[in-house]
Image (cartoon, rainbow, N blue to C red):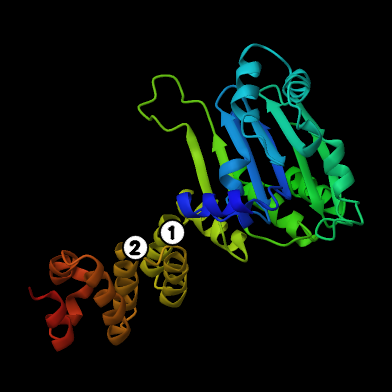
């Protein structure tokens, strides 16, 4: 107690946060031969699992380290994969060298699609220990598929990892979208018995030859602390994948075809994903103006100009607002 008080006074770090260091977690690691992408998706009833669990290096492999997460597993596993060891050899090496291995769960995949998983004896026992009311009754284990592996501990049942595997195998779209679908499927079967708190998705891919891009992390998003991290994680994923821009382009096409109600609906979907983007509010004002709903156009236009005043000058010469130029409220918005 005394040392705890000293730590609290010196570092303002509550010792209570250390009472349960276990990352009761479910995750998926995957390799996509078509794109050479490597990815990790994770959810946990623990703070900042998206920062602690996933590791990946393009052209090498991906790792999920969880339960009593040993973060040194990530860089160690990547280094061993680079030396030519198989995932099974890597997992054996890093766990053999770790005195705390009985409390760990770790999964490794390489660019041949081979994977290996280790779940420590204490992880399994703790899930079925009557003296541990927080974790008692949970499931710890994994399911391995073609070029992916799903693993978890303190889960509602084996159905969690089975549902995740099925969702990933049957999924379409990008790797990140399939990882998100797998996480959703796991939660639909009960997920972590303790509930939800944090989540993350990491996808990396080698840069093409002569590429001008320097971005190997295609998707790198996380939600650290909320009652349902998947709502925010999917919103962030949609932003990363450019969904608002695609919805805006679709809205523009619909308006061009005279389908104004549909166009407005699509633009509102874009704003729901990225409410802080002034260009999306401006586009909604344009769609309303095209529909002849001038009063409705003024509201998103005002919001756009509030967020970015230079849009007032742009609106003043925008032909889509031509029929609104004599409106007193419009003049107020566009006049410096």
Residue 148 visible somewhere in the drawing: no
* Residue at 44%, 64% in the rendered image: 270
Position of 65 with respect to 327 (left or right) is: right
Q: Position of residue 107 (x, y in %)?
A: 73, 33
Which of these two is toward me, 173 or 15?
15
Residue in view at x 17 percent, y 67 percent: 309
Q: CA distance from mark 2 to mark 1?
A: 10 Å
Image position of 5 (left or right of 153): left
- Residue 236 coordinates in the image, percent (x, y): 50, 55
Q: Nearer the viewer, residue 239 or 263?
A: 239
The answer to whether the residue labelled 2 contacts the one labelled 1, judged by CB atoms less than 8 Å apart, is yes
Mark seen at residue 277: 2
In the picture provided, is 325 more to the left or to the right than 118?
left
Residue 298 appears in the rendering: yes
Q: Is residue 232 above or below residue 104?
A: below
Residue at the outermost top position: 83
User: Which mark sits nearer the N-terminus, 2 or 1?
Assistant: 1
Residue linked to disc 1? 244
Residue at the spot 42% in from the left edge and 74% down from the top edge: 264
Whole-percent x, y for residue 153 in the image? 79, 47
Is residue 104 positioned above or below 293 on the image?
Answer: above
Dot 2: within a 10 Å radius of its alpha carbon, few (fewer than 14), some, or many (20 or more) residues?
A: some
Provide the secondary structure element on which disc 1 rests.
helix
């Amino acid at each position: 107690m005394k040392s705890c008080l000293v730590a609290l006074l010196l570092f303002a770090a509550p010792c209570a946060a250390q009472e349960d260091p276990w990352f009761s977690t479910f995750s998926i690691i995957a390799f996509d031969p078509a794109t050479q992408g490597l990815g990790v998706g994770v959810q946990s009833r623990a703070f900042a699992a998206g920062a602690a669990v996933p590791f990946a290096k393009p052209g090498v492999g991906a790792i999920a380290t969880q339960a009593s997460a040993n973060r040194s597993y990530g860089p160690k596993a990547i280094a061993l994969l680079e030396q030519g060891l198989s995932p099974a050899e890597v997992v054996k090496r890093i766990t053999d060298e770790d005195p705390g291995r009985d409390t760990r769960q770790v999964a490794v995949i390489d660019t041949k699609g081979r994977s290996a998983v280790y779940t420590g004896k204490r992880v399994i026992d703790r899930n079925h220990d009557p003296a541990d009311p927080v974790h008692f009754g949970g499931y710890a284990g994994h399911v391995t598929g073609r070029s992916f592996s799903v693993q978890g501990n303190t889960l509602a049942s084996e159905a969690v990892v089975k549902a995740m595997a099925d969702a990933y195998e049957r999924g379409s779209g990008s790797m990140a979208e399939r990882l998100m679908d797998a996480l959703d499927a796991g939660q639909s079967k009960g997920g972590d018995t303790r509930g939800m708190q944090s989540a993350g998705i990491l996808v990396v891919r080698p840069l093409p030859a002569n590429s001008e891009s320097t971005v190997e992390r295609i998707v790198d998003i996380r939600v650290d602390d909320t009652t349902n991290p998947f709502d925010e994680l999917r919103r962030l994923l949609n932003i990363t994948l450019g969904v608002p821009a695609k919805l805006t382009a679709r809205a523009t096409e619909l308006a061009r075809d005279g389908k104004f109600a549909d166009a407005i609906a699509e633009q509102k979907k874009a704003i729901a994903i990225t409410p802080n983007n002034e260009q999306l509010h401006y586009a909604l004002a344009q769609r309303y103006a095209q529909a002849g709903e001038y009063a409705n156009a003024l509201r998103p236009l005002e919001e756009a100009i509030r967020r970015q005043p230079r849009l007032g000058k742009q609106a003043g010469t925008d032909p889509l607002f031509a029929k609104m130029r004599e409106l007193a409220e419009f003049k107020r918005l566009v006049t410096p």
